[in-house]
Amino acid sequence: WKSPKGWKCRPHQDSVQSFKRKLKRLTTRKWSIDLTTRIERLNWVIRGWVNYFSLGNMKTILTQIDERLRTRIRVIIWKQWKKKSRRLWGLLKLGVPKWIADKVSGWGNHYQLVAQKSVLKRAISKPALTKRGLVSCLDFYLKRHALKVS
């Protein structure tokens, strides 16, 4: 594509859609595998795709994909906790105040809605998922892109 500074490259829409489909397949709620294994497989796909397309400009695309991926992982974690007592335990362990955790843990099975609430976003944040081993698409891209462009 042509920018004011000259010609730039970026991945084709079909490649981006294929990447999104792979991530979606790896983050389905009905697939019951350990979160560590799931994160490991996600990292394989993320690293491979970003390494292949790291020369292109795709910061905005990866920002959106990264946000969506974290939301899907929050949904998976919320579903794995299943019962109110387990959700309360998990939220307290993540540092949420007891009165908020007690209120939020009773929200039930509206997974997508709960995962987009600020309480769960703050509890299972980007640093928390990074600590668990998840590679951020955007951060990994920015490192690789800087190496290839310079």
Image (tube, rainbow, N blue to C red):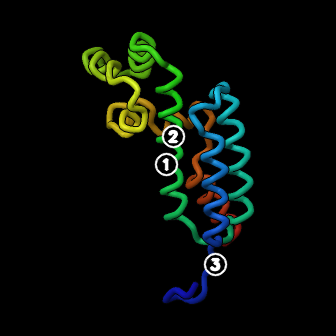
Q: Mark 3: give few (<14), some (14-19) or many (20+) Cα within 10 Å.
A: few
Residue 33, compared with residue 125, is above or below; it is: above
How packed mark 1 is, by other alpha carbons closer than 10 Å (few <14, some 14-19, many 20 or more), is some
Local secondary structure at mark 3:
loop
Residue under label 2: 72
- Provide the residue designation for mark 3: 9
Q: Is residue 3 above or below residue 56?
A: below
Distance of label 1 from label 2 (alpha carbons):
6 Å
Mark toward the start of the polypeptide (3 vs 1): 3
Q: Nearer the viewer's eye, disc 2 or disc 3?
A: 2
Task: Give residue 40's position: percent from left, percent from top.
Answer: 70, 36
Indicate which disc residue 68 carries. Answer: 1
| Nearer the observer, 93 or 18 | 18
For badge 2, the amino acid type reads Arg
Q: Are marks 2 and 3 in contact (CB under 8 Å)?
A: no
Q: Amino acid at mark 1?
A: Arg
Q: Quadrant of the C terminus?
A: bottom right
